[in-house]
Image (spheres, rainbow, N blue to C red):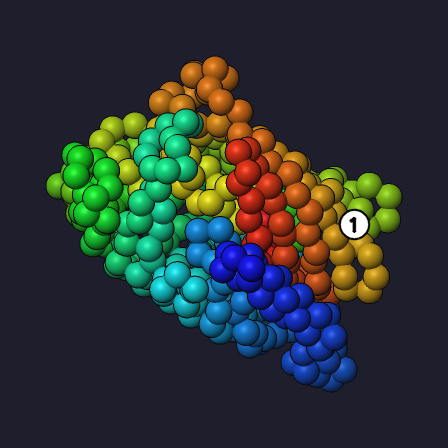
Amino acid sequence: MRQSSRQAIVTCALGATWILSAALVTPLTAQRADSTTRSDSVGRRRIQPLPALASAPETGLQYGATVLAVWEPAAYRKTRPSSLTASALRTAKAQTRIRLEGERWTRGNAQRITGSLQWQEFPLPYYGVGDRTPKAAEETFTPKGTEAIVTLQQRIARSWYLSAGARHLEQRITTDSTGALGTQPVTGNAGGTMTEWSTGLLTDTRDNLFSPHAGDWIQLTYARSVQGAWSDYSYGTLKLDARSYRTIGTGHVLATQLQLTNVDGTAPFDQLALVGSGDILRGYARGRYRDRAMAAWQGEYRTPIRHRLGAVAFVGAGSVSPTLNGIISHRLLPTYGAGLRVEIDHRQRTGVRADYGRGRDGASGLYIGFNNAF
């Protein structure tokens, strides 16, 4: 049996074990909160340590530890829960990532503050730029460094928010000596420093943060990096992310997402618009196709099976191009697949997932992680 086949079987077996464990074990913190307090009047706190088991085509099996903390305010405050996640991951391809991220909502959801801090040494594949890069062009580059992100949202009317944020990335990139990144003048092939300042407008009517059954989330943002202002590069990124959730019958949900990205200026190759990940166009390795513009759509049907176990089926398609205007004339990249879901916290609808997706030219991937893809 080939090594890749054996690895896929081991990954599936471990993923199934983790999902079954999550389905069978109810956290003591949740039981205690429900039995000793009235969470509608005093709120609820939950801290859940979990083994971090994940998978993606570009990483193989990922393993480590995660601690998820959720603070649910009392119902009378009419405020969404705040959360904090700490994780440490190591992968089968010698990749390491340590990450701390969280979000806090103020009373009545008037403001939202999010932030993350990450250190990684994470070898990734690179195939070139464009929608027809051959599989044979694959090489490996390794970014090593730290990334920090902070974003503030301020409600301006009902479900509408203005946002402002900053992202700072310092990294060093090493590449294969025989590949294009090591032998050709590719922007950003040595890494560097990047600071992006962003602003945006969004509307959020979702009924839940982690697994919505109804509502919409639509965000338009523009981020700018200016050379000399804590940055080695000048470029901008315009992004539209539109998501919709509709309940069909009892417990059945139809979710859709449209994502458009356009990058201008002298952007590093790893900051271009990418196709493929565990969140958008599952089935393609992250960065399998990249260019200055990307358009992608996906739809997902979510159905309960029994108790906290559920299933999903998804389809999608996307494309990359030098410009958004040229997207329609470039190669279509379809994807489809299915997966399982297990709720960890019924009140907040947090859970774990395992998805298998397929794409064009034999591309495929198994994804294991927390919560839904979008």
The answer to which image quadrant residue 222 occupies is: top left
Residue 326: % across, % down: 43, 16
Q: Is residue 61 in sight in this rendering?
A: yes
| Closest to the observer, 298 or 38 | 298
Q: In this view, does 352 lie to the left or right of 290?
A: right
Q: Which residue lies furthest to the right in this view?
A: 249
**Residue wearing tag 1:** 303
Identified by mark 1, the residue type is Thr
Residue 201: % across, % down: 47, 36
Q: Residue furthest left?
A: 228
Residue 327: % across, % down: 46, 20
Query: Which residue shows up at 28% across the image and 49% down it?
Result: 141
Q: Where 63 falls versus 207 (above or below)?
A: below
| Closest to the observer, 365 or 166 | 365
Bin the neighbour count of mark 1 within 10 Å (Cα to Cα): few under 14, some 14-19, many 20 and up: many
Residue 186: % across, % down: 21, 36
Query: Which residue shows up at 54% across the image and 74% down it?
Result: 51
Query: Which residue shows up at 76% across the image and 61% down it?
Result: 309
Query: Which residue shows up at 39% across the image and 32% down it?
Result: 134
Q: Is residue 200 in sight in this rendering?
A: no
Q: Where 245 falls versus 210 (above or below)?
A: above
Looking at the rendered structure, the secondary structure element under dot 1 is strand
The answer to which image quadrant residue 182 occupies is: top left
Q: Where 155 falls versus 305 (above or below)?
A: above
| Closest to the observer, 249 or 370 | 370
Q: Is residue 339 left or right of residue 317?
A: right
Q: In which quarter of the image is the N terminus?
A: bottom right
